[in-house]
Amino acid sequence: MHCYFHLVHMHDRILDETGIEVSDLEAAHYQAVKAIQELRQEGEADAVDWRGWQLDVTDDTGKVLLSIPLDTPQH
C-alpha cells in the first residue's frame, strides 16, 4: 500500500507529496516512528518546538491510517 506522511499542527500542514510503498500498517507505523526520530536528530531539532504537531499517515484517498504526536517521546 502507498502511504503519505504529513506533519500537521492545527491549521498548518507540511504535506508529503511523494509517499512511500509499505507492505502493511505495521510497516507504515515503523516508517513513521523512524521519520520522527530523524526529525529529532537533525541539527536544529532542539530549536524546533514540536508541541502540538503530529505525523499523520494517510493512504491514497487521504484517509488517516494512524497519527503519532511529535511531542510524545518515541521508543
Image: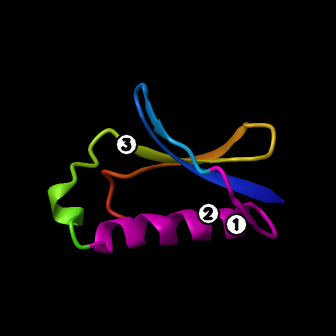
Towards the viewer: 5 or 17: 17
Q: Which mark is residue 9?
A: none
Towards the viewer: 68 or 16: 16
Using the numbered discs, state the Cα–Cα distance from disc 1 to disc 2 in whole angstroms: 5 Å
Image coordinates of residue 21 in percent, x first then y, are 78, 66
Q: Which residue: 17% across, 63% down?
A: 46
SS class of the residue under badge 2? helix
Foreground label between 1 and 3: 3
Q: Quadrant of the N terminus?
A: bottom right
Image coordinates of residue 23 in percent, x first then y, are 81, 70
Task: Look at the numbered discs 1 and 2 and tell me whether their residues touch, using CB distance below 8 Å.
Answer: yes
Q: What is the span of residues highlighted in magenta in the rendered image?
A: 17-42
Q: List the residue tagged with mark 3.
A: 53
Image coordinates of residue 72 in percent, x first then y, are 33, 54
Decide whether the magenta segment is chiefly helix, strand or loop: helix
Identity of the amino acid at label 1? Glu
Compared with 4, 31 (above or below) is: below
Identity of the amino acid at label 3? Trp
Task: Look at the numbered discs 1 and 3 and tell me whether their residues touch, using CB distance below 8 Å.
Answer: no
- For marks 1 and 3, the one nearer the N-term is 1
Q: Residues within 10 Å of mark 3 (few under 14, many from 20)?
A: some
Image coordinates of residue 48 in percent, x first then y, are 22, 54
Q: List the residue tagged with mark 1.
A: 26
Identity of the amino acid at label 2? His
Q: List the residue tagged with mark 2.
A: 29
Q: Which residue: 21% across, 49% down?
A: 49
Compared with 54, 30 (above or below) is: below
SS class of the residue under badge 3? loop
Q: Residues within 10 Å of mark 2 (few under 14, many from 20)?
A: some
Note whether residue 75 is visible. no
